[in-house]
Amino acid sequence: MEDIRFTLDHCVKCNICTSMCPVSRVTPLFPGPKYAGPQAQRLRYGPSTDRSVDFCSGCGICSQVCPHGVKIAEINAKARHTMYQECGIPLRNQIIARPDVLGRLASPAAPVINLAMRLPGVRRAMEAILHIHHAAPMPSFSFETFPAWFRNRRQQIPSLRNPSSNHGTTSGATTPDETVVYYHGCATHFYEPRIGKAAIKVLERNGYQVIVPEQGCCGLPLMSNGNFEAARQVVRFNVARLLPYARQGLPIVATSSSCSLMLKREVREILDMQDDDTALVSAHLYDICEFLLIRLAMGQLDIAFQPIPLRVPYHAPCQLRGHGFGKPALELLQLIPELETIEMSAACCGTAGTYGYKQEKYSIAMAVGEELFSAIHSTNPHLSACDSETCRWQIVHGTGLPSVHPIELLAAAYQ
Amino acid sequence: MTSSRFPGYDIIVIGAGVAGLMAGITATNLGARTLVVAKGVGSTALTTGAIDILGTQNIPPTRSPAQAGPISMLPSPIRPASLSAALQQLRQSQPHHPYAIISQENLQAGIELFRHTCAQAGLHYTGIADENLWLPTALGAVRPTALAPAAQQAGVVDRPEPYLIVGFHQLKDFYPLYLADNLNRTSGHPARGIYLEIPRIAARADWFTLYLAQLFDDPALRYTVAQQIRSHLLPGERVGFPAVLGQQTSQPEIPWLDLQHLLGVPVFEIPTVPPSVPGWRMFEALKAGFRAAGGQLLIGSQVVESSVDKQKVLAIKVQTAARLLTLEAGAFILAAGGLYGGGLLSYWDGKLEEPLFGLPVATPGAAQITDWHRPTYGAAHPAQEFGLATNAQLQPLDANQEPAFENLFAAGAMLAHWNPWHEKSGDGVTIATGYQAALSATHCLGDRV
Ligand SMILES: Cc1cc2nc3c(=O)[nH]c(=O)nc-3n(C[C@H](O)[C@H](O)[C@H](O)COP(=O)(O)OP(=O)(O)OC[C@H]3O[C@@H](n4cnc5c(N)ncnc54)[C@H](O)[C@@H]3O)c2cc1C
Ligand code: SF4
Ligand code: SF4
């Protein structure tokens, strides 16, 4: 594959990307995608040329709207990496980039830690020492992790036991094309097991046997915090765990649209991991709504949904849009009687993974998200839906309303 | 699995420029389940937001290079003659022109649908039925156009008021004094320019039009700007702004109307270099219209292949992050833009290609690559007329001049035998052909819709 940085040659300087960049619109600290991307890239022979590229949130909107195929967000990600190689990665970035390590340390003591994190003094201290903004929407750790729930459940229901899996397997058919592998990612693992439970419910309802292999963080937070080497390591770890299933031709389904985009594409385009094993795993990865919509097209989705009389504003996260398959959740939610899903037109919630946690970027992230927050408020004062975890947490923070993954609505409609 | 398939559509439109969105709106209104898929946002935000139908007349038909005349062969502007008469003349002299193959009724119906769609989004278009409006450009020239956003209307040269042109130091490529000097010459009206200050404006490398426009959504800022203008304003003057008066999409005309109200004189916007806010507003209005009609929009995804049999297009394939996605439909509309928009490709050796269906690209007036361009800048270059030849239903033709596929239609800048730059007919042809392509495609679906 050609280095994506060469796409700069297609730039005609139309500034469409700049007009759409949610960050440079709200802050003069970031000069915008055309400057940070194709323009600055011409000058980047070796040493880093511009520190302001750190203010690019990596949302990817610029690459989606560019009429000429310039991979601007990807160019910026690589430039950020070069910059951090020169000036070193701050401790803060090292910490927030490892949600799996944090989860492993914190989950056993979840109640205490969650309580501590709510104390204003603790968050102020974190801000002073680590430059993590005190108001940033930190998720709560779950006492029971998703894999623990999954294992326990298997032990309670003897018919679910199946020796062929690492962590566990659920009931249902056993033929290979009715088996799926579930990649839950860190958020479901440590913070929101409810999303994994919903996914399992929906998949099982449709007759799938679900395998949940041992897995680690997808590496996206490490990559976006400039630590490419560590990111490649965790990707290699995951590829090794997922490869046997990909070799069998089993679909690997993920509930986080950011993790799945990372493993589908960013590993190749940004981390330059061009090996066949990674490619094979990428080729078998599906976002869960993408997967279900494909099943619907094949006439293989149980559509006996019970009514949910609700009006739900839906935000398709930037990373989901980056998959390039549209908004499958919208089509699936339409199948639920009485559920009215309203697509939000605001581009970005602002947080872009860990960007909004950072002391110097928190207010930018909130300014970016403002349009979305007020649109949600004017649509429905009860609930919103979104496919990506950090976006949901930001939306909850910005709106004060709960936010769910579309799979939770589907699971609820299966009763 | 290297490819996957989603549920199908009645009609799939490739391209989200004006042609694609107008086709999508038309098809959705006619009851077709429609998807518009595009790799990027197209050329809409680069335009002035005004709709050119035909700005020149006595356009000579494309001639072979041997007959090519010097630059003085520029066609004459339609001023003040009737638009419909000029269209009629064009239809007769150029039978392959899109205006010649589309009926006058469908051209009008398409324009009406466009107008209506924009009005639903709070963006009103004004224009006289049969005459062009002459409006100032950012260089102080005047240009003919058929429909203009209401916020540009008071700039017309036919009005008697002298011009006061205001600008901001932050905005590059808009020089009010230079503009006024030229406008004085081109319009014959007195014109002067001044710079205004925006209080507490942040220092930044570049203030793009859309960023400045964002500031004008704030009523307090409009109030201070109006105060400054009032101290300069001479009796009877009208006030021209760079087109940055607001970017919010819910009521796009409010900032302009408010300034007009505060100043008590006619206020108008002059479109800037790209990306232009009026073009952007038009894009937003069309997108909103398409969504409201129930259409699905997928931007950021490139169509890379098609799957066809002898008579029909069966499906297109879209590049997603990890695999190709197959999308099936009963009919397809190709509105992928021309050589600029990416729907047609050209190579150094003179090869021209329509990459998705392998349709032949017509090159009227240019047998070989050395004929593509004329030596002078302002001339009508044959390359500007390259594109797909079609029949009256806008079905692209194969090498034997037969419809290539019974369910494939084409619209917009992809089409051959017209020259948006020279004729000043860009979005007129684009809207009309987008509309017509959707009519034909829906018709071809028959009972399916
Ligand atoms: C700078 C500029 C200024 C102009 N100003 C005016 C004006 O003021 N008034 C006026 O009337 N006209 C103007 N025009 C002309 C007019 O805008 C064009 O005729 C019109 O924009 C063409 O629209 P279109 O929809 O055919 O193509 P485009 O707007 O080019 O759209 C093409 C679409 O196809 C998509 N596409 C291409 N290939 C693929 C693929 N393989 N897969 C998926 N999608 C694909 C693109 O992403 C895009 O969405 C201007 C044009 C330009 C370039
Ligand atoms: S949108 Fe694409 S072509 Fe236009 S300035 Fe940005 S990178 Fe360049
Ligand atoms: S990735 Fe997002 S924040 Fe970064 S330049 Fe592109 S649009 Fe702006």
Image (tube, helix red, strand yellow):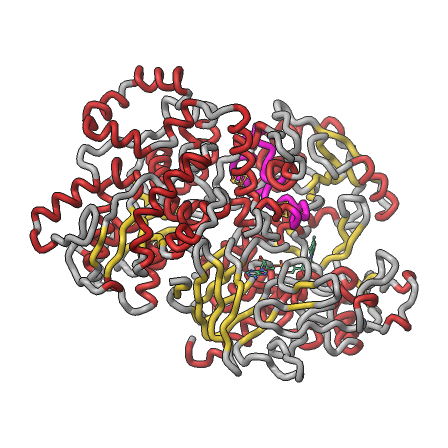
Locate residue A104: give its quadrant.
Answer: top left
Residue A387 makes an appearance in the image: no
Residue B316 makes an appearance in the image: yes
Locate residue B99: give its quadrant.
Answer: bottom right
Which residue is nearer to you in this view: B445 or A359? Answer: A359
**Residue at the image point whose x is 46% and y is 44% from the top:** A346
Query: In the rendering, at what x and y percent does residue B119 appear?
Result: 55, 55
Query: In the rendering, at what x and y percent does residue B405 appear?
Result: 55, 79
Residue A407 versus residue A144 in the image, above or below: below
The span shown in magenta is A9-34
Locate residue B89: give its quadrant.
Answer: bottom right
Query: In the rendering, at what x and y percent does residue B355 appear?
Result: 60, 67
Query: Is residue A150 toward the left or the right of residue B333 in the image?
Result: left
Which quadrant does the C terminus of chain B fall into? bottom left
Which quadrant does the N terminus of chain B fall into? bottom left
**Residue at the image point whose x is 64% and y is 70% from the top:** B107
Which residue is nearer to you in this view: A220 or B336? Answer: A220
- Residue A340 belongs to the span the image colors magenta: no
